[in-house]
Image: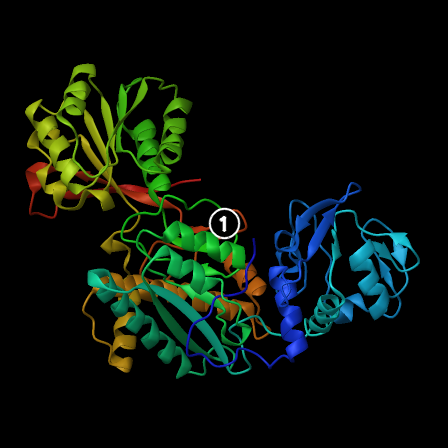
Amino acid sequence: MPFAPPVFTGLEASAAQLTPQEERGRQVYITGTSPSGTPIQAFFGKDLLEVPGESATCVSCHGYDGLGRTESGVIPSNITWSQIMKSYGHIHPDGLEHGAFTVESLKSYMEDGFYPGRKQGDPSMPVYWFAKQDLDDLVAYLKKLDSYLDPGISDSQIRIGTLLPSDGASAELGEVMRRTIVAYFNDINSSGGIYGRSLTLAADKLRTAADISGFLRRVEPDKGIFALVNTFTPGMETEVGHLTEEQQIPLIVPFSLIPIEDQLLHRYRFYLYAGMREQISALALHAVRSLPLKNPRIRILYPERDGIEQVIASAEAIYQAKGWQNISRVSFPSGGGIPTATLAGLRKVGSDLILFLGGESEAEMLLKELGDSGCDTTFFMPGVLAGKSIYQIPSSCKGKAWLSFPSLPDDRKEWGMSEFEAMVSRQQLAVTNPTAQLAAYASAKILVEGLRRSGRNLSRERLLEALEGIFEFDTGLSPLVSYNKNRRIGALGSHIVEIDPLQTGTAEFAIRRGWIAVQ
């Protein structure tokens, strides 16, 4: 269900103050609940199927700005006050005409579904049962939709949020990235900001999934944020993503040490690099296009964890489209290494290609096994999972070891690095973790590009539309970035790298074999 926007402590009001009645109406509009606790009920269709108000909120279809969002193939009406109260009435897309609304006929329509003149309203629009006070409050808030800014926007500021770990090494990494984004925002502000608005970053440090849930669901509109950028929430990425979707908060390029598996199309989430699904799909495309294999015996070896089998299915589909059918999955328990029996079973059935999705220590176990057996198979693995195990690839695997990487240092252009270094110098920013800081800088650049394209009349919906219009945007630090309505990964593909174990310690150890785009 949709919830009100998250709150970042310490921020001033995000828009003109609402009256107490308008505040109450805003809660009704966004959450479908009454400040008094009185139930609100929604009824759908001719049979008046009853659901709680929080399952049929105004904001879920009409959006925070009231302009209307496509929902299950239905395009809800623009319900901003100037639009809904047109003095000459309305002509709907289906040709139905009716007279102008008054405040009372609008209230009546929300309760019985009839337009002025007792004409049957849109059947996709539920009718509601409200307490009189809640209905009056809701109408009072609707009058502000023309002028009320999305959370996190004022005439002078745009407040962007980020979520960071609270302790340990991850917290230190998060703090380094926070300082980088603050420095970049300060640099933007020193040149006039975004159409006269300054950028402010508010960071919140969270400890548990319950903290995230409670933090994002608080209803305090005067301390909202406009969008999230470069969130770093190890182990909680999926939950944060779901909550941002529920609350319609744009999430721009979350940061993760491990590729996020759930990077399918989500309206409010924009990623920079390919996740696990896309990285192993790139390897599969490399196999079917470039390697001298004929209906190979393919073994996919992976630790058991939620969601991984759906990721594997994408690579399997590519192999099968080539006519390769001899594919089997081999799983093992997470966290305890690869059992000896699993390795023995793998040796017994044989393979021509192994796609490995475990971690660094598990890869070392498998690579030792491959070396002991003469490496009579091709080895595939996402490079970000391999870590230092790539240095354990046995010499007998020369010409047979391939990794995929969503980005490589060579993606950083000279002008991109110069631009970053100039910002660092101007803002006197300490560079202690270049990789993480460049990632944070790139994510903030994508956000700023979206804000600039959105114009002065900014809203979350306009930001989404602006980001969806980005095509081959060059951050100077990554592959070219493109988004659209059906694409939420900016650099949708992976570099394919061949490892030559005979060249360890030389420039020929890791050989780039090209970029493979993934659809």
- Judging from the image, what secondary structure is the residue with disc 1 in? loop
Residue 285: percent from left, percent from top: 35, 33
Residue 386: percent from left, percent from top: 19, 42
Q: Residue at x 70, y 54 (%)?
A: 41
Q: Residue at x 74, y 51 (%)?
A: 126
In the rendered view, tell whether residue 110 sits above or below residue 314.
below
In the rendered view, tell whether residue 84 sits above or below residue 356.
below
Residue marked by disc 1: 266
Question: Seen in the image, is 29 located left or right of residue 352?
Answer: right
Residue 295: percent from left, percent from top: 31, 17
Residue 101 in view, yes or no? no
Q: Quadrant of the C terminus?
A: top left
Question: Seen in the image, is 16 located left or right of residue 444?
Answer: right
Work out which residue is located at the far top of the displayed protein and give it: 348
Question: Seen in the image, is 3 located left or right of residue 429?
Answer: right
The disc labelled 1 sits on which kind of residue? Answer: His
Foreground: 318 or 36?
A: 36
